[in-house]
């Protein structure tokens, strides 16, 4: 069994349907990681700028 997430109410469950809103749940798949990330330095720079505010 895999952990599933309701896209409507953001609740996690193991069921195919959310018990709160009765919507179909999805598998929350994380973004892929690449060591050759071309835009990593820009993301880190933006994150540093946002933390400074």
Image (tube, rainbow, N blue to C red):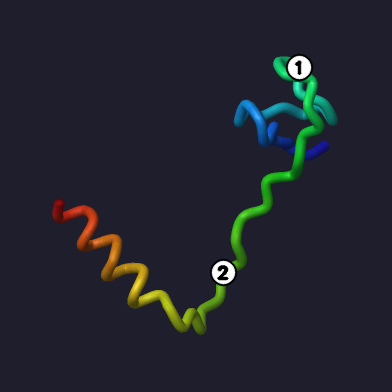
Mark 1, residue position:
19
- Image-based side of 13 in relation to 1, left or right: left
User: Residue at image x 32%, y 68%?
Assistant: 44
Q: CA distance from mark 2 to mark 1?
A: 32 Å
Q: Position of residue 29 (x, y in %)?
A: 68, 52
Mark 2, mark 1: which one is toward the viewer?
1
Quarter of the image where one finds residue 27: top right
Give the mark, 2 or 1, whose residue is nearer the N terminus. Answer: 1
- Residue 41 is left or right of residue 12, and the answer is left
In the image, residue 47 sits, relative to residue 37, either above or below, namely above
Report which residue position mark 2 lands on: 33
Q: Who's the residue at 77% across and 34% down the image? A: 25
Question: Dot 1: within a 10 Å radius of its alpha carbon, few (fewer than 14), some, or many (20 or more) residues?
Answer: few
Residue density around tag 2, few if under 14, some if 14–19, many if 20 or more, within 10 Å? few
Check disc 1 and report its element: helix, strand or loop: loop
Q: What kind of element bears circle 2?
A: loop
Percent position of residue 42, x then y: 34, 75
Residue 38 horizontal/vertical position (percent): 46, 83
Q: Out of 15 and 49, give the one closest to the viewer.
A: 49
37 to 14, vertically: above or below: below
Q: Is residue 52 above or below residue 25?
A: below
What's the residue at 66%, 30% (across, down)? 8
Give how far across and how far down residue 45 sits, in percent.
27, 70
Residue at image position (76%, 41%) is 26
């Amino acid at each position: 069994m895999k952990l599933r997430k309701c896209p409507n109410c953001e609740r996690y469950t193991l069921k195919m349907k959310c018990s709160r809103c009765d919507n179909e749940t999805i598998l929350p798949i994380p973004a892929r990681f690449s060591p050759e990330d071309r835009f990593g330095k820009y993301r880190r720079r933006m994150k540093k700028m946002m933390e400074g505010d």
